[in-house]
Image (cartoon, rainbow, N blue to C red):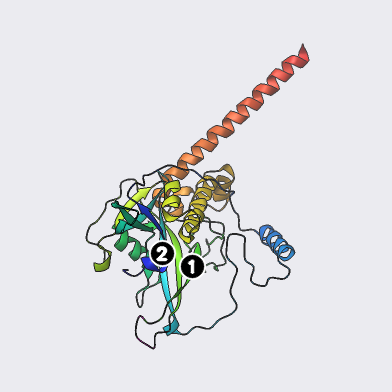
């Protein structure tokens, strides 16, 4: 929606910026009792005093609070990844000439987000905002996300399978006075999801609101996305997390252990409804299979050579 962009700090760049490429990797995560117990022990050891300490990736928590409806807004945002290329969708809006060089134009770079409509779920709001602001048809990207959401009452529900839960929540204070003297401002809570687009997405014009018509949609590399958003900005932290989760999911689901696990529970990759992400996951599976075969072949060759040397 039109006011969504201004509610988070975003990076200003000039029209000299251009795409780049990048890669990243993380260690896969499994939801197990052993991980939970180990994490709990480490937490108590590292944070015996601070009651608001969270995981190293998150900011500290806040004291218990009660806010009534006039004092908060709920919103949803989305990091959109193209799984086959690893690129990220960014939006930009021109803000005027550069005071230091009037021949250049300054831009705001940001991610699609906005307030949820009445009666709308956060998931619906995330997909709608992504479509309205980017002009692209986006679907959720299932990821291996550590979370505390309870499982639905289904016989095949499994904590270890990919899901489409939000990867983080951003809390932002908005100033009062926008709606008169009785508007005291409030807290804006944005739930961030991860979406995906196919190889050849079709841009649809005319999807933006009246105050969004100057938005422009770009597909850029991971490194360039961080640069344009500001390396240490809140939005860059969100993109880093989304990208790490995607790479974890791609490499984990393509691994031998996950193939065995899926077989044990009677599933395969095609049954996980991965959408465009399935292709790079299958490619990762093939790469890892070739790597295992190469290691096995090398080990076998070394054993044969050792045996021959021993006989001589």
Tell me if I can see residue 137 in this picture: no
Task: Spot the residue most to the top.
Answer: 312
Q: What residue is shown at x 43% (from left), y 66% (from top)?
A: 8
Instruction: Provide the residue designation for mark 1.
Output: 170
Q: What residue is shown at x 58% (from left), y 59% (from top)?
A: 57
Is 3 rendered above or below residue 100? below
In the image, residue 245 lies at what x, y percent? 51, 53
Question: Is 179 colored magenta in this rendering?
Answer: yes
Spatial CA distance of label 1 from label 2 is: 10 Å
Task: Work out which quarter of the rendered image holds the N terminus and state it.
Answer: bottom left
In the image, residue 265 lies at what x, y percent? 55, 53
Q: Which label sits on residue 107? A: none
Task: Work out which quarter of the rendered image holds the C terminus and state it.
Answer: top right
Instruction: Provide the residue designation for mark 2.
Output: 77
Q: Nearer the viewer, residue 220 or 207?
A: 220
SS of the residue under disc 1: strand
Q: What residue is shown at x 73% (from left), y 68% (from top)?
A: 48
Badge 1 vs badge 2, beta-carbon distance below 8 Å: yes
Q: What residue is shown at x 43% (from left), y 42% (from top)?
A: 21
Crowding at dot 1, Cα within 10 Å, few <14 / some 14-19 / many 20+, comes out as some
SS of the residue under disc 2: strand
Q: Main secondary structure of the magenta part?
A: loop
Q: Which residues are magenta?
A: 178-182
- Tell which tag, 1 or 2, sits nearer the viewer: 1
Tell me if I can see residue 14 in this picture: yes
Q: Which corner quadrant of the image does residue 91 belong to? A: bottom left
């Amino acid at each position: 929606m039109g006011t969504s962009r201004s509610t988070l700090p975003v990076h200003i760049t000039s029209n000299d910026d251009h795409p780049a490429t990048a890669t990243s990797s993380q260690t896969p995560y499994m939801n197990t009792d052993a991980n939970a117990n180990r994490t709990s022990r480490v937490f108590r050891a590292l944070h015996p005093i601070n009651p608001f300490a969270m995981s190293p990736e998150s900011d500290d928590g806040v004291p218990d609070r009660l806010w009534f409806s006039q004092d908060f807004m709920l919103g949803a945002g989305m990091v959109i990844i193209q799984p086959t290329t690893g690129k990220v969708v960014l939006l930009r809006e021109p803000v005027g000439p550069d005071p230091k060089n009037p021949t250049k134009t300054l831009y705001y770079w940001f991610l699609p987000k906005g307030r949820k409509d009445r009666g709308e779920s956060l998931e619906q709001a995330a997909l709608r905002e992504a479509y309205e602001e980017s002009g692209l048809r986006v679907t959720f990207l299932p990821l291996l996300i550590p979370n505390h959401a309870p499982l639905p009452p289904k016989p095949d529900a499994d904590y270890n399978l990919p899901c489409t839960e939000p990867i983080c929540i951003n809390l932002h204070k908005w100033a009062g006075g926008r709606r008169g003297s009785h508007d005291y401002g409030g807290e804006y809570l944005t739930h961030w999801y991860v979406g995906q687009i196919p190889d050849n997405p079709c841009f649809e014009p005319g999807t933006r609101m009246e105050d969004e018509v100057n938005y422009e949609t770009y597909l850029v590399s991971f490194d360039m996305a961080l640069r344009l958003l500001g390396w240490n900005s809140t939005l860059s932290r969100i993109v880093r997390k989304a990208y790490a989760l995607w790479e974890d999911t791609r490499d984990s689901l393509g691994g031998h252990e996950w193939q065995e696990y899926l077989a044990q529970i009677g599933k395969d990759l095609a049954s996980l409804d991965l959408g465009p992400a399935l292709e790079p996951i299958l490619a990762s599976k093939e790469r890892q299979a070739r790597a295992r075969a190469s290691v096995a072949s090398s080990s076998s060759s070394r054993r044969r050579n050792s045996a021959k040397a021993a006989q001589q």
